[in-house]
Amino acid sequence: MTSSLLTDRYELTMIDAAIGSGTANRDCVFEVFARSLPGGRRYGVVAGTGRLLDLIADFRFTDAELGWLRDNGIVGPEALAWLADYRFTGNIFGYQEGDLYFPGSPILVVEGTFAEAVILETLALSVLNYDSAVASAAARMVSAASGRPLAEMGSRRTGEWSAVAAARAAYIAGFGATSNLEAGRDWGIPTMGTAAHSFTLLHDTEEEAFRAQVDALGPGTTLLVDTYDVPTAVELAVKVAGTGLGAVRIDSGDLPEQVAAVRKQLDSLGATGTKITVTNDLDEFTIAALRAAPVDSYGVGTSVVTGSGSPAAGMVYKLVARKDADGDWISVAKKSPQKATVGGRKYPIREFTDAGKATAEVIHIGEAPADAPHHRPLLVPLVENGTPVDDYRGVEGVALARSHHADAMAELPAEAFRLGRGDPVIPTRYA
């Protein structure tokens, strides 16, 4: 399956016009960055890189796409001939997936001719904007959960393929499982799920529903106890499954009060090892409010797949350097108010204290800085001469991104974990 038409029309019309003006083959550098962090957050999380590498590898124009473009008059014959042979042959560098970013961070650097690089704009932004928004929200939820596990269960609250991307991004940010089976198959993410309220309502009694589930899944299953009356359901759950019941799930009510009462009841029935999981439209703020409650795990749906109020990360894809007619490199930048950009090829590093805590994002322009103590270069090669680096793709790439994210989060100072609106936890400086 080709990804070539997952793009905006103007990418192709720009190529058509650039071919006509003789500028399509000028060497260029494009960068992806965010001017600010959404929602007054203190850091962002890079996600989607591995997915993007797969989509770039599949970015081809077959006869079907070329015929549609021709029939609809999108571009002329010269551009169609160019598209027929399209393969990205340049280089891409980027922040390693799972790393953190801040305003101005050049999380993706694309080097190639104007035509072969500009055509990737929409694809890159659609992936990185959504996946990074989900991962950034998920990371806040993981922090709020204080070590208690979280499961992503938002497939019914977003598009069918966005659900797979969201599960992947949330897992990279520290969630432990997903309800989405395609995400489990594609990316190696643990899956979870047992029964909904409809299963209880299907049966003549709640006890019959519980017995059917335990017969099918064993006593270690999770029984949903808020279809009718919670105390009655908890008593029935232990009666049916025994004191070895795996967990009960609560999906409604005043959660702090409800959880405390259920924990007390379970203990009184001898089910001291039975865990309590809660769902019910959770976000990072409600999770934080449950820190003192005896909750064992959380299931999060709508909030995580919609970026907890910020469904896009606000990233842009801008030309920052190109060769002129004489073949010399020049920096280019937008000058318009509120949307000005910083020209020149960027080489970002992160500075640290002696204790290993991040203090600044320093972006060098035009030339990479020399190695120095207490700083970490942030760009890694992602595509080399048109070939994606396999380390960052597939199931292994997801595992690497999850591990790298945990390391990057450990570098943040304590104030990064405040949930209230605020400035980025470290400043961005240009050098």
Image (cartoon, rainbow, N blue to C red):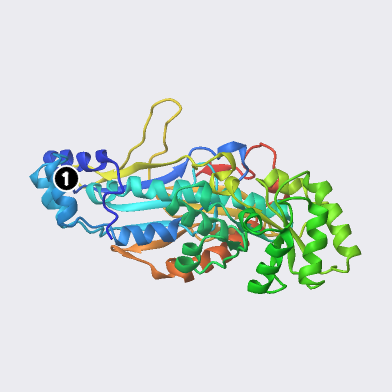
Q: Measured from the top left, where is residue 174 in percent x and y?
A: 62, 60
Q: Where on the picture, by quarter, is residue 179?
A: bottom right
Q: Which residue is nearer to you in this view: 71 or 405?
A: 71
Q: How many marks?
A: 1
Q: Amino acid at mark 1?
A: Leu
Relative to 9, is 312 on the left or the right?
Answer: right
Q: Measured from the top left, where is residue 262 in percent x and y?
A: 83, 56
Please identify the quadrant where the N terminus is shown: bottom left
The residue at 46%/27% (across/down) is 338
The residue at 25%/38% (across/down) is 10
Q: Measured from the top left, where is residue 272 in percent x and y?
A: 85, 68
The residue at 71%/62% (across/down) is 223
Q: Which residue is nearer to you in this view: 116 or 283?
A: 283
Q: Measured from the top left, where is residue 260 in percent x and y?
A: 85, 53
Q: Which residue position is annotated with label 1?
A: 69
Relative to 275, is 409 on the left or the right?
Answer: left
Q: Residue furthest front?
A: 204
Q: Which residue is nearer to you in this view: 85 or 265?
A: 265
Q: Is residue 148 visible?
A: no
Q: Residue furthest left?
A: 77
Q: Is residue 396 visible?
A: yes
The vertical placement of 238 against 370, above or below, is below
- Mark 1 neighbour class, 10 Å CA radius: few under 14, some 14 to 19, many 20 or more: some
Q: Which residue is nearer to you in this view: 301 or 125?
A: 301
The residue at 70%/50% (across/down) is 251
Q: Secondary structure at mark 1?
A: helix
